[in-house]
Amino acid sequence: SECDLHFLVHSMLDIGHLNMEQDVKLINEGPQEGLWVMTDEVKLTKVFMNLIGNAKKFTTQGHIVVGAKITSDDVWVECWVKDTGIGISPENLEHIFDRFYKVNEFKQGTGLGLSICGAIIELLEGQIWVESVLGEGTTFYFRIPYQKPKEEGI
Ligand code: ATP
Ligand code: MG
């Protein structure tokens, strides 16, 4: 169904503000109003929620950036969640999409969030990937095929 990308990113940031105890700023890099795409909004929301939840869990200061855009070739809806958190080492980075894989056992969580994100994105025929520097931060990207609604805004 039709999904308003501007509204979606906005909502994700609203939810991100809830229970934010640390001094972390949420930054909106979402698109302008009126950008509608055909997609499964519920699934997309789940992916964002998992990634933002992770960003909050592993970031004690700095900022979390949430964004979305259509790629310049009009092929993909590309989204990202960027944080200035603890980062992930290259060795661990290879495994984080595996079920039950956690780097820090002392942190809350079952280690399933990213494997669910991976499964959802696969279902939507997209891709998900990550860039991270230990001690500096992490950025998750995902993209799904861009499908325009037949009539914009409806
Ligand atoms: P769950 O999502 O099931 O509550 P979880 O958050 O531990 O548990 P995943 O979301 O699958 O599980 O993430 C797997 C692991 O990847 C995390 O435990 C953490 O070690 C690492 N990780 C994920 N996102 C980040 C991030 N933004 N910064 C640093 N490490 C991360
Ligand atoms: Mg998680």
Image (cartoon, grey):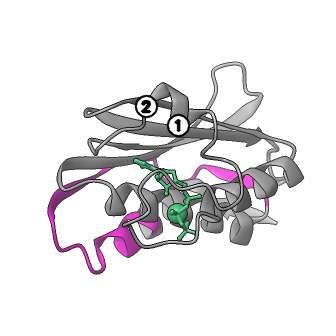
Quarter of the picture holding the C terminus = bottom right
Position of 11 with respect to 24 (left or right) is: right
Query: Which picture quadrant has residue 57?
Result: bottom left
Residue placed under numbered mark 2 in the picture: 89
Position of 145 with respect to 152 (left or right) is: right
Badge 2 element:
loop
Q: For residue 94, say whether it is visible.
A: yes
Residue 86 location in percent, x, y?
Answer: 29, 44
Does the numbered disc 1 mark a residue whose Cβ is under 8 Å from ligand 1?
yes
Comparing 136 with 18, the one in front is: 136
Kind of residue indicated by mark 2:
Ser
Q: In this picture, which residue range is highlighted in magenta?
A: 12-39
Residue at 53 percent across and 66 percent down: it is: 49
Q: Is residue 96 above or below residue 52?
A: above
Query: Which picture quadrant has residue 77?
Result: top right
Q: Is residue 143 above or below residue 18?
A: above
Kind of residue indicated by mark 1:
Asn
Q: For residue 29, say whether it is visible.
A: no
Q: Residue furthest bottom?
A: 19
Q: Residue furthest front?
A: 105
Q: Which mark is residue 8?
A: none
